[in-house]
Amino acid sequence: MCGALNRYGHRVQYQEDNSLRGFARLLGERRWAELVEMGALRSYRPGAFLIRQGDRGGFLLALTSGRVKVLASERDGSEVLLSLRGPGDLVGEMAAKRENERSATVQAVDNCTARFLLRTDFDRFLLEQDARALFADYLVAKLSETVPYQIHQVHFSPKQRVARLLLEVVRLADPSHPDHWRVPFSQDGLASALGLARSTVAEQLSALRSDGVLGPGPRIVVADVQALARQAGAIDR
């Protein structure tokens, strides 16, 4: 267990975890580094679109820093959150072939960098590195994310649903980022992602602040990530 003061003066308790995640974890450090080196560097500001639903495929992106949200547009024009992804993940891998249309939009949550890879180059890499089975495993794991995030959370209480989303956001953050413990979502954004009323989200955030899980003030800042994990039901009490 480690502790540190974040930029807001709150002491954060956490356990260090420097392991790779996502497709990078499956590949291992050496092969992930080789894959990243193949691609052209792309940078995105918060709110920028990496991929838009309905566009043609032909490429995918390997995320190297920052967090993104994967969104699907409904017929009424609304958007639902499918998943969050971070460094070590791929985006655009579901419809990377040129003849396929993108089934979701990918939008930067914070400053992001990624490597642009043509599908033909990516396929050649998988063949040369004997990694096609690993990519198939990654695709299977990500297929569940075609279901809206709020449906995945339907069996949890409102407090657990809020806590689980906050926990996922901070776990995907770069530990060296000065706002590592801040959740860059508005109450409206959380409510939409979770399928909850804004008043319910506000109530749960207030309770988490009262319990010392979140810091005071209007911003959503995690003060005790272990307590947040307990609220989320992610670790044993």
Image (cartoon, rainbow, N blue to C red):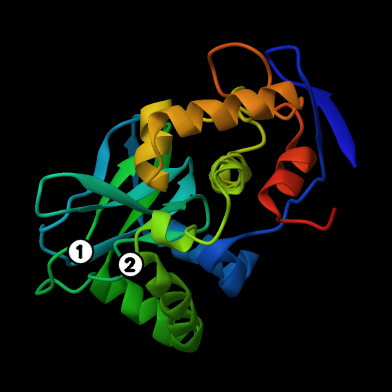
- Name the element at disc 1: loop
Q: Which residue in the protein does label 2 denote?
A: 146
Identify residue type, mark 2: Thr
Rate crowding at label 1 as few (under 14), some (14 to 19) or many (20 or more) other CA atoms within 10 Å: many
Q: CA distance from mark 2 to mark 1?
A: 9 Å
| Residue 25: percent from left, percent from top | 61, 67
Residue 108 location in percent, x, y?
Answer: 35, 39
Compared across the picture, whether 8 is left or right of 201 comes to: right
Give the mark toward the camera: 2 or 1.
Answer: 2
Whether pointer 2 and pointer 1 mark residues with C-beta atoms closer than 8 Å, the reply is yes
Tag shown at residue 103: 1
Q: Residue furthest right?
A: 1
Q: Is residue 77 above or below residue 97?
A: above
Q: Is residue 186 visible?
A: no
Query: Is the residue 180 above or below the residue 120 in the image?
Result: above
Question: Which residue is at a point 10% across and 48% down the rendered structure image?
Answer: 76
Q: Which residue is more in the foreground, 227 or 210?
A: 210
Q: Quadrant of residue 121?
A: bottom left
Dot 2 falls on a residue whose secondary structure is: helix
